[in-house]
Amino acid sequence: MVIGRFQVMAILQAARAFILGMPEESAKSWGLNRAIFYAAAKRGFKGTSPMTAEYQRAKIGEEIDVYRLGDEIAFKEVREGKLYFTIGGKILTEKDFYKQIESRFGESFHEAWKEALKIVSMYDHAILLSQRRFYEEVYKPMRDELAKRWTELSLKKLKIKI
């Protein structure tokens, strides 16, 4: 299957969160959350914001929890002792990450995950803690190269020529 920028963003963001100390299932929730957020931001949040449900809850005085990863925030929810992130009122679990990201890789996901961890671990924590610097210095320069390489990797495992 073709791996696009959305999948690259999700994996690199998950790797970032993991390297900064988040458990893997929470890191995958973070990665998917950020990929959805950036995709919506790119479209200009047309229609409704992916965070509308959270903002509506905050407006009426319902307590909402936010999590800070460096200077970036996301709405959080703790379920069964695990930290997950929400967007548009939906809790994103490791199962959602599997369905939307991991499954596209087939058998090659673990290789891509190891590569993402290696890439992200090469950067100084100051870069990883900065939303802007992570986007500009880690994700943006590598996104198209990784999408191409990971697509080739996933298709190779499926024995499909491109």
Image (cartoon, rainbow, N blue to C red):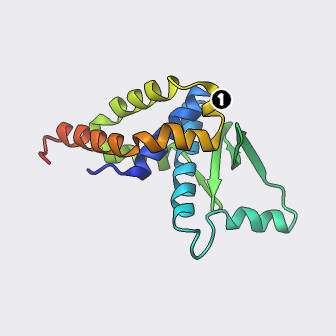
Task: Let me know if residue 127 appears in the view.
Answer: yes
Where residue 160 sits, quadrant-wise, is top left
Above/below status of 141 relative to 56: above
Residue 57 image offset from top left, x and y in percent: 78, 65
Q: Nearer the viewer, residue 10 or 86?
A: 10
Q: Is residue 12 left or right of residue 74?
A: left
Task: Let me know if residue 28 appears in the view.
Answer: no
Residue 106 image offset from top left, x and y in percent: 29, 41
Q: Amino acid at mark 1?
A: Ala
Where residue 157 sits, quadrant-wise, is top left
What residue is shown at x 28% (from left), y 39% (from top)? Answer: 149
What residue is shown at x 44% (from left), y 24% (from top)? Answer: 118
Q: Dot 1 corresponds to which residue?
A: 126
Q: Is residue 58 left or right of residue 98?
A: right
Q: Can you name the residue that lies furthest to the right here?
A: 61
Q: Is residue 88 left or right of residue 96?
A: right
Q: Can you name the residue that lies furthest to the bottom here?
A: 47
